Structures are given as C-alpha cells and as structure tokens.
C-alpha cells in the first residue's frame, strides 16, 4: 500500500506515511486514512520519508486534511520530506500553514 496510517495507543496522534509519488492517484487512500476516525486525533503527522514526488493535487490534499482537522487550530506536522519536496512546500508557503520538519 502506498499510503499507510497508524493511530497512537492513546488515540491522540495519527501518522500517515506516503510511499512513492504523492499525487492524485493517492487521493482516496489519503482521505481514507483520516476521514473516518472518531474521535479525530489531536495531532496528525504526515511522514514523507518515502515520498519521491509531490504535485499540486497533493498540496490540495494537505489543505483538505488541514480543514478537516480544524483549520487554523489544527496540529498537522509534515516530516521527513526530501529537499525537492521541501522546496515545493516552501514555494507554496505551506510552511506558514503546517509545521514542516
């Protein structure tokens, strides 16, 4: 599976890991990883360690996740991005919307 998710034992943190290309083909898998969780976790970590590519539809998916998680009050962290992916996130000013490490 190209998108995997894991909820912490206490249910407070969801980690979504992306493997390969993060593009529109991953749309449904990505949404399935967080939409049906109840209660919603307080923190979401998007792990891009194994992501090789990110396009505009992936940026849109991250925005949908942010909106679903509470918008400005959400705690979403994008971690382990490679330099190319980090550059795309920076150019898109996503560092102002997400905690990017």
Image: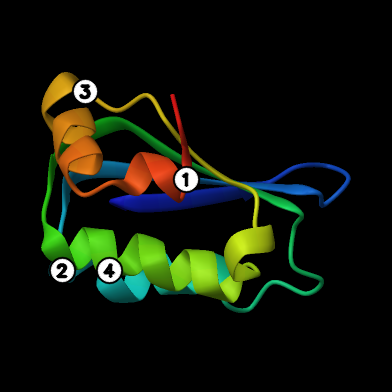
Q: Which residue is mark 2?
A: 25
Helix, strand or loop at mark 3: loop
Q: Which residue is mark 1?
A: 98
- Percent from the top left, x then y, of residue 87? 15, 31
Mark with earlier residue (2, 4): 2
Mark with earlier residue (4, 3): 4
Q: Which mark is residue 82?
A: 3
- Percent from the top left, x then y, of residue 46? 46, 43
In this rendering, the answer to whether 70 lies above or below 20 is below
What's the residue at 58%, 68% (across, down)?
A: 71
Helix, strand or loop at mark 2: helix
In this rendering, the answer to whether 77 lies above or below 92 is above
Mark with earlier residue (1, 3): 3
**C-alpha gap between disc 1 and disc 4:** 13 Å
Crowding around mark 2 (Cα neighbors within 10 Å: few <14, some 14 to 19, many 20+) is few
- Percent from the top left, x then y, of residue 3? 36, 53
Q: Nearer the viewer, mark 1 or mark 4?
A: 1
Q: Are marks 2 and 4 in contact (CB under 8 Å)?
A: no
Mark with earlier residue (2, 1): 2
Helix, strand or loop at mark 4: helix
Q: Nearer the viewer, mark 2 or mark 1?
A: 1
């Amino acid at each position: 599976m190209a998108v995997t998710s894991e909820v912490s034992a206490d249910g407070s943190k969801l980690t979504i890991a992306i493997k390969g290309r993060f593009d529109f083909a991953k749309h449904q898998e990505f949404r399935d990883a967080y939409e049906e969780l109840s209660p919603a976790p307080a923190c979401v970590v998007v792990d891009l360690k194994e992501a090789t590519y990110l396009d505009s539809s992936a940026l849109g998916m991250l925005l949908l996740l942010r909106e679903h998680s509470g918008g400005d009050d959400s705690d979403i962290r994008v971690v382990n991005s490679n330099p190319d992916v980090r550059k795309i996130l920076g150019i898109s000013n996503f560092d102002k919307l997400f905690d990017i490490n």
